Image: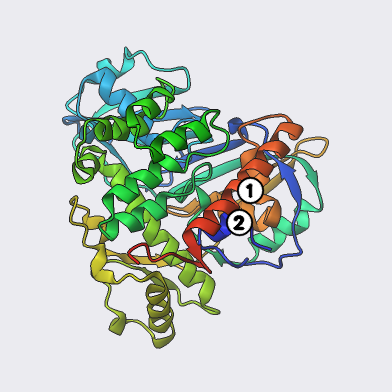
Amino acid sequence: MASALDHICGIHKYSTESTKAIYAELHCVDDFIVEEILKDGTIISVDDPKLRPSGYPGLFTHFILVKRNMDTLIAIKILSKRLNVPSNFFFLSGLKDKEALTAQRACVFNVPPENLVSLKLPKNMKIYNPIRELRRISIGDHQGNRFRIRLRNVVGCLEDVFHEIVKEQILNFFGHQRFGIWKPTNHIVGKMILLGLYEEALMTFLREVNPLFPNREAFIDLLEERKYGDALKLLPARKFWLERLVLRGLTKGVDPIKILRYMPQGLLRLVVEAYQSFLFNLLLSELEDPPRKLPLVGHKLNLETLDSKTASAIKEILDGEGISPKDFKVTCAKLEISRGGFRVSRILLKDPALRKEGGRDYLVMFSLPKGSFATIVLREIAKENLVQLLLGRRKSSSIETARIFREMNNYYLAIVRKYFVGSNLQNFTV
């Protein structure tokens, strides 16, 4: 049976038999390693991070960013502040998981390599091999990602389950981290922005703090009372930087549209794309035999160009959502990414391998094309045990993980009750 988190993310079926599953644990972020694969097939390894120069130096400095348990946008924010250059001077081909050890290629405009070498950074992020290059990196400028995932205390026959997944193409759902695992409201906020409900979007972003936040109830009460300055005081000084930005704006009476414009465009793009991803997941869940590619709903979507089954399913989903493609023409910010596009409906694991590491621990290895999610592969392995598996990256104690899972599951169920009607998000304009 799909979990409450699956429901929130619009994921309603498996690619393999639901009875074929195992129990396993992740004990820390180091159990989940993500390494970017460049277009030429080179893997940016966390063990030996190196870049091969193109031979055409220029004003862009390319480097390898290795981070541990850090959001990619936070990493760029730190680099921007310490190098004293705008964040839009940095370029990546894609985001990487937060709760993982990751390695990826990045670049910055007009910063000498020696400035990166001498930079003092937090211990959970490092820069390697800065080199001058003529061209910058663009979104999608990589082939895919290699994953090395250590599953601990496995119960069940992992070999059989993994073999079943490897031999077939699996449904290419957008993974849970696209929506948020600890705060799965990105797509909810994104839909509100598309509908022009800017204040509601900001309040949802603030209000849905997860139950592990120690001052959660007091914080929510202060938000309801519009005591934004007092709510701001409850947030830790070195975390929740985006929440603090929003609260400072609300405290000063800044118009919600202007607050959204102050927020990083990458974040606004992320939440709107999260809603596109949610609609895609609903569509992929609905179709019995999906075509090779399915559309991402955007303002340029033309249903007449699609096969009748796909067009009919999209229309039914959009009717249930109370939204239309033209709503994706965002007016509060320049988000041309919301025009839409296409995404493959199924993927095949590349270079899969499984290695027993002693006791009941295994190392699972595979590569996926860019834009595909390892958590969807883990979902096929662990089925209903996935959420507890993912939450375990934060705490190493099995007892503590079980407690967190109970609290988070209740939180997910509350989000479903509050924001959903069946499999659809509510029509917030009614």
Check the image and name the residue furthest to the front: 225
Q: Position of residue 362 (x, y in %)?
A: 73, 41
Residue under the point 29% across and 43% down:
266
Task: Give the quadrant of the C terminus.
Answer: bottom left
- Of the residues shown, which amino acid type is indicated by label 1? Asn
Instruction: Judge left or right: residue 356 versus residue 265.
Output: right
Nearest to N terminus: mark 2 or mark 1? 2
Residue 176 sits above or below residue 278 on the image: above
State the separation of the CA atoms marked 2 and 1. Answer: 7 Å
Q: Which residue is mark 1?
A: 409
Quadrant of res 293? bottom left
Q: Is there any visible trace of residue 44 in the rendered image? A: no
Residue at 53%, 31% (x, y): give it: 213
Between 61 and 175, which is closer to the camera in this rendering?
175
Quadrant of residue 72 within the rendered picture: top left
Mark 2 lies on a secondary structure that is helix
Q: Is residue 156 above or below residue 406?
A: below
Q: Secondary structure at mark 1?
A: helix
Residue 346 on image: x %, y %: 51, 67
Q: Are marks 2 and 1 in contact (CB under 8 Å)?
A: yes
Residue under label 2: 4
Q: Is residue 393 visible?
A: yes
Three-letter amino acid code at disc 2?
A: Ala
Measured from the top left, where is residue 31 in percent x and y?
63, 35
- Determine the residue positioned at 71% across, 32% down: 400
The quadrant in which residue 329 appears is bottom left
